[in-house]
Image: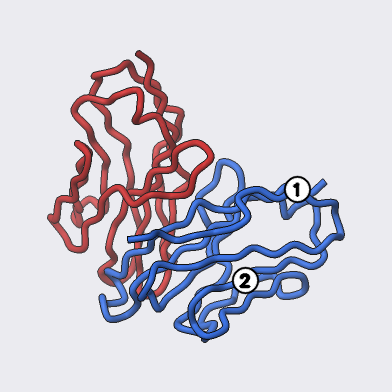
Chain colours: A blue, B red
């Protein structure tokens, strides 16, 4: 079974430029997550989708970040414009969803996109 | 709110040594507990999990037991290998959110 796919793996951009990250979850997984991981820290949730609905985006900086999950499968996270402080790893994860029970639903992570803003 | 506290690293061991990485948590309800491992330049891989008190998760020689009385989920391995060098994250799953600790780096030398 294929895992979570993310692209690109690495991205270097100048500040104020836009950037987009793409994620394809494990087949059949209804729930998709985007996380931000700063150096030396654990991942922090940016947004969670249940199918195509964003059910938790409270930690997403909406002035510059946006996300979409059209058709409830793959997803795109965008930053416009990027700032120096956005340099980090952006992780996508998916899980089967509530049919496993909210407390036991296991998340599986992609390899991440390492963003460097110059 | 939910929180996870891990021992700070790096943890430096020689090959075949015994490993313990401490993890304690604070949570409401009945969370599930996880250990994830992150190898250099890669994403997080699920290592093991436990969904209720006294459950023991195990995988690849690693073990952790869900201790509700001490709110702990310590990771252990009897004999580490150089290939185990990575960052290990303890995490808890509440009703909707997965909360991670800051991670513990493990360095194993030959």
Image side of residue A1 versus residue A75, left or right = left
Residue at figure coordinates x 38%, y 60% from the top left? A2
Q: Dot 1 corresponds to which residue?
A: A12
In this rendering, is residue B60 above or below B98? above
Quadrant in which the N terminus of chain B appears: bottom left
The chain carrying label 2 is A
Instruction: Return the x and y of residue B70 as percentages of the image width and height.
Output: 22, 50
Seen from the viewer's position, the closer of residues B67 and A20 is: A20
Check the image and name the residue furthest to the top: B110
Residue at figure coordinates x 70%, y 70% from the top left? A61
Instruction: Return the x and y of residue B16 as percentages of the image width and height.
Output: 24, 19
Q: Dot 2 corresponds to which residue?
A: A76
The chain carrying label 1 is A
Residue at figure coordinates x 32%, y 49% from the top left? B35
Seen from the viewer's position, the closer of residues B100 and A69 is: A69
Instruction: Return the x and y of residue B21 as percentages of the image width and height.
Output: 32, 36
Task: Give the SS element for disc 2.
Answer: strand
Quadrant in which the C terminus of chain B appears: top left
Instruction: Return the x and y of residue B65 as percentages of the image width and height.
Output: 18, 48
């Amino acid at each position: 079974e294929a895992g979570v796919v993310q692209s690109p793996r690495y991205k270097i951009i100048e500040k104020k430029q836009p950037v987009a990250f793409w994620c394809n979850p494990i087949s059949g997984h209804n729930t998709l997550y985007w996380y931000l991981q700063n150096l030396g820290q654990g991942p922090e949730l940016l947004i969670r989708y249940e199918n195509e609905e964003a059910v938790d985006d409270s930690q997403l900086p909406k002035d510059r970040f946006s996300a979409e999950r059209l058709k409830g499968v793959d997803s795109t996270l965008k930053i416009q414009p990027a700032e120096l402080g956005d340099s980090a790893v952006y992780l996508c994860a998916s899980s089967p969803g509530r049919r496993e029970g909210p407390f036991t639903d296991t998340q599986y992570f992609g390899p991440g996109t390492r963003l460097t803003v110059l | 709110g939910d929180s996870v506290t891990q021992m700070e690293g790096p943890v430096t061991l020689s090959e075949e040594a015994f490993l313990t990485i401490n993890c304690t948590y604070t949570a409401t309800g009945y969370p599930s507990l996880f250990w994830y491992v992150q190898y250099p330049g890669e994403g997080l891989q699920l290592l093991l999990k436990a969904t209720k008190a006294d459950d023991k998760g195990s995988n690849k020689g690693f073990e952790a037991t869900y201790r509700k009385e001490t709110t702990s989920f310590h990771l252990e391995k009897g004999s580490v290998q150089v290939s185990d060098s990575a960052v290990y994250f303890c995490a808890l799953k509440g009703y909707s959110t997965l909360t991670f600790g800051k991670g513990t780096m493990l360095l194993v030398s030959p």
